[in-house]
Each structure stands twice: as structure tokens, then as C-alpha cells.
Image: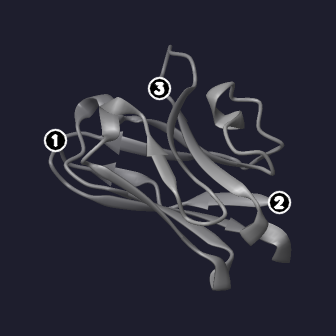
């Protein structure tokens, strides 16, 4: 079971840190990705991190967002810096045993989303 948290209201240019916590001890063996869905838009991939810590990002967040994992805490974080109005969305974390599944969005496990609102 995955639980995303950390969403809230943030001003443009500000920062926010999202966390994805898992109840399973095997969480460290999964690849984890963040997705987001803005109002009226389709869900899109944001970032992913593999079991060994390798990462990949969507072009629109490169240099602004950082994904990391704390296996001892069964947690994957998404540090969001220099946020923009366009980052407003519900953010979801998902896990899959196969690297690359995030490209199709067909991840094995999904958590409930956390809302990020960028507003001045």
C-alpha cells in the first residue's frame, strides 16, 4: 500500500516536498515513480527512481525536481523547487517491479494522490 503526502499550497518559485510511504518491507525492491494529473488534463509522468537509485525525469521538471529514496524508511521523496503555476496537479506515486513501466503508466501499485496548488 502506498500513501502520498506533503501536498499543499505553495507560491510560484517556492518549494515543496512530497513523500510516498509504503507499508511493505519489500518496497526497496521496487521502482517508484511520481505522476501528476492537472485539472482537465491526462495523467503524466514526472520522475522515477530505480531500486539502485538511478533516476529519470520528465523534461518539464529537470533541474527543478529531485526524486530520492530512503529505503530504511520505506519512503520515496519528490523535492519540488522553483515551482510554477503549471505544476498545480494531484500527484500520485506508484511502484512496479519492472523498470521502465512508468513509460506506459501501467504500474502495479498506486497510491492515493496529494494535491499541489501553486498560487500567488
* Any part of residue 24 in sight: no
Drawn side of residue 104 relative to residue 109, left or right: left
Give the labeled residue for mark 2.
1
Residue 41, given in percent of the width and then of the height, sits at 50, 15
**For the residue carrying disc 3, how many other residues have a C-alpha within 10 Å: few (<14), some (14-19), or many (20+)?**
some
Label 1 – label 3 distance at C-alpha: 18 Å
Residue 46, given in percent of the width and then of the height, sits at 48, 38
Give the labeled residue for mark 1.
120
- Outermost residue on the bottom side: it is 72
Residue 120, given in percent of the width and then of the height, sits at 16, 41
Above or below, 72 against 37 in this view is below
**For the residue carrying disc 1, how many other residues have a C-alpha within 10 Å: few (<14), some (14-19), or many (20+)?**
few
What mark, if any, has residue 89 been given in the picture? none
Total of numbered circles in the picture?
Answer: 3
Q: Nearer the viewer, residue 9 or 42?
A: 42
Above or below, 72 against 116 in this view is below
CB under 8 Å between discs 1 and 3: no
Drawn side of residue 38 relative to residue 98, left or right: left
The residue sitting at 34% across, 31% down in the picture is: 59
**Colour theme:** one colour
* Any part of residue 91 in sight: yes
Drawn side of residue 25 relative to residue 117, left or right: right
Give the labeled residue for mark 3.
38
Disc number lying in front (1 or 3): 3
Which tag, 2 or 3, sits closer to the chain's start? Answer: 2
Which tag, 1 or 3, sits closer to the chain's start? Answer: 3
Amino acid at each position: 500500500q502506498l500513501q502520498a503526502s506533503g501536498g499543499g499550497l505553495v507560491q510560484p518559485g517556492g518549494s515543496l516536498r512530497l513523500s510516498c510511504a509504503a507499508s511493505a518491507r519489500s518496497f526497496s525492491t521496487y521502482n517508484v515513480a511520481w505522476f501528476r494529473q492537472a485539472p482537465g488534463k491526462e495523467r503524466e509522468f514526472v520522475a522515477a527512481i530505480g531500486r539502485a537509485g538511478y533516476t529519470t525525469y520528465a523534461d518539464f521538471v529537470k533541474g527543478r525536481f529531485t526524486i530520492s529514496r530512503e529505503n530504511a524508511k520505506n519512503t520515496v521523496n519528490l523535492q519540488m523547487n522553483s515551482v510554477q503555476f503549471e505544476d498545480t496537479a494531484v500527484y500520485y506515486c506508484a511502484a512496479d517491479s519492472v523498470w521502465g513501466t512508468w513509460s506506459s503508466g501501467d504500474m502495479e501499485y498506486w497510491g492515493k494522490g496529494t494535491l499541489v496548488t501553486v498560487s500567488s
